[in-house]
Image: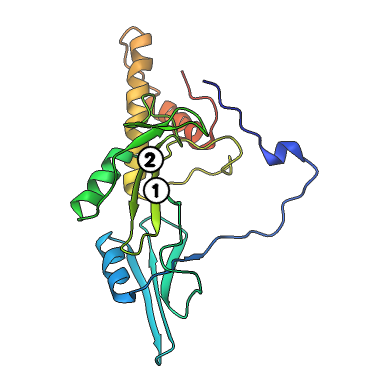
Amino acid sequence: MNIQVRNNSEIDPSRARGIDLKLEVVAIPVSDVDRAKQFYSRLGWRLDADFIDGNHFRGVQFTPPGSPTSIHFGMGVTSAAPGTAQGLFLVVSDIEAARAEFVGRGVDVGEIFHIAAPGHPPMPGPDPERRSYFSYAPFSDPDGNSWLLQEVTARFPGRVDASQTKFSSGADLAAALRRAAEAHGQYEKRLGGRHDENWPEWYAEYLIAEQAGKDLPQ
């Protein structure tokens, strides 16, 4: 199935890029601050702060590994009802490995599912073709704030700066190298089994193209 993606920069090419805006923190409404702190600590997220100001304010901040965006919760942080933060996405490079790690940390994670196309009902298991954006696994914190693990290995065109190739962690880079190695193995088979002496250049081209959402080397 061919998924059409509309790129806003293509729709309105005259729109100039403005000042950089980096999403810093998302507020999570909770009923029990210490219980929530224990839960997000168990996920292995970095505790950045736990500020207390008398009996009226307490702010706790965590950052997921490799994420530029943090979460914070506490007392006096948000007026939203506990558990009303829904559909928060955590992007991972390997949905099965990520789910296994969370389960190993004692988190109740739902089964992996995929969607055939946006708007279609979920189906069990990861996407058979392991397409980016199509495989998920749900979990919630003790208040019912819901999260989705989403497997993304290649971004849609226009979603990343094509002049930069970045990896948020060693694990993400290792996963990308494994995908490149598998693809390069198929490439060498097409060469008749001959060793490709230019494999570093091939790997580099693959990693750059995959992250930028461009056609992969064949």
Residue 98 in the figure: left or right of residue 56: left
Identity of the residue furthest to the right in this view = 14
User: Which residue lies at the image location 34% right of the left edge and 75% below the top edge?
Assistant: 33
The answer to which image quadrant residue 20 occupies is: bottom right
Residue 168 position in % (x across, y down):
41, 50
Q: Callout 1, which amino acid?
A: Leu
Q: Nearer the viewer, residue 174 or 110?
A: 110
**Residue 191, placed above or below residue 125:** above
* Label 2: which secondary element: strand
Residue 184 position in % (x across, y down):
36, 22
**How many C-alpha atoms fall within 10 Å of the one at disc 2: few (<14), some, or many (≥20)?**
many
Disc 2 + disc 1, Cβ < 8 Å: yes
Q: How is the image coloured?
A: rainbow
**Residue 51, placed above or below residue 114:** below
Label ID, residue 148:
1
Of callouts 2 and 1, the N-terminal one: 2
Residue 119 position in % (x across, y down):
52, 34
Residue 141 in the figure: left or right of residue 163: left
* Label 1: which secondary element: strand
Q: Callout 2, which amino acid?
A: Tyr
Residue, disc 2 = 136
